[in-house]
Image (tube, rainbow, N blue to C red):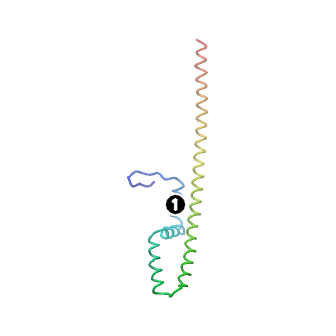
C-alpha cells in the first residue's frame, strides 16, 4: 500500500504489487525502466538537441556520416527498449486480467451459492407459513 497525495492509504492491485516486486528484484528490468524513463523525457530531447548541434558544428563536416551512424544505432537500441516495455506491459495486463477473472469467477460462485441458499430458506419459510396456515 502506498500513500496518496491527500494522505489517504491507496490499495494497489495484487498484480501491480507483484509486478513492482519483480521489477525491483531484477537488475536488468530496473536498468531498462530507467533507460526507458529517461528516453521518454524532455531532458533526453534537450540533451540530443545540444549534442547533435555541437557534433554538427564542431566535430564533423557535412553530410555527417558518423552522426548518422550513431543516431541509427541509438534508434535501434531505443526501439528495443520500447519493445521490452511493451512486452512487459502486455504480460502485466494479461496477469491482471487473469487475476480479475479469477476474482470475478469466485464472486460469481459465491453469489450463486448465496442465491441458492436464500431460495432454499425462502422455500422452507413459505412451506412453513403456508403449512401452518392450512393447519389452523
Report the residue at 48% width, 84% height from top: 56
Which percent across, then down, holds residue 61? 50, 88
Extreme residue in the front direction = 62
Up the image or down, 13 lies above or below 78; here it is: above
Residue at position x 58%, y 31% in the image: 118
Q: Residue at x 61, y 14 (%)?
A: 134
Residue 2 or 86: which is nearer the viewer? Answer: 86
| Horizontal and vertical percent position of residue 124 | 60, 24
Q: Quadrant of the C terminus?
A: top right
Mark 1 Cα-neighbour bin, 10 Å: few <14, some 14–19, many ≥20: few
Front residue of 50/63: it is 63
Count of marks, rendered view: 1
Residue for badge 1: 21
Question: Residue at position x 44%, y 78% from top?
Answer: 50
Secondary structure at badge 1 equals: helix
Q: Position of residue 62 (x, y in %)?
A: 52, 86
Picture coordinates of residue 72, whole percent (x, y): 56, 78
Amino acid at each position: 500500500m502506498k500513500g496518496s497525495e491527500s494522505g489517504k492509504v491507496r490499495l494497489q492491485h495484487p498484480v501491480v504489487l507483484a509486478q513492482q516486486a519483480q521489477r525491483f528484484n531484477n537488475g536488468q528490468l530496473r536498468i531498462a525502466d530507467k533507460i526507458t524513463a529517461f528516453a521518454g523525457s524532455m531532458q533526453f530531447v534537450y540533451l540530443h538537441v545540444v549534442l547533435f548541434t555541437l557534433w554538427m558544428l564542431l566535430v564533423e563536416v557535412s553530410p555527417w556520416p558518423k552522426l548518422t551512424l550513431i543516431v541509427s544505432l541509438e534508434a535501434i537500441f531505443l526501439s528495443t527498449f520500447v519493445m521490452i516495455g511493451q512486452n512487459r506491459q502486455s504480460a502485466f495486463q494479461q496477469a491482471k486480467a487473469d487475476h480479475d477473472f479469477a476474482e470475478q469467477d469466485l464472486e460469481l460462485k459465491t453469489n450463486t451459492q448465496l442465491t441458492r441458499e436464500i431460495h432454499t430458506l425462502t422455500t422452507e419459510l413459505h412451506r412453513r407459513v403456508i403449512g401452518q396456515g392450512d393447519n389452523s
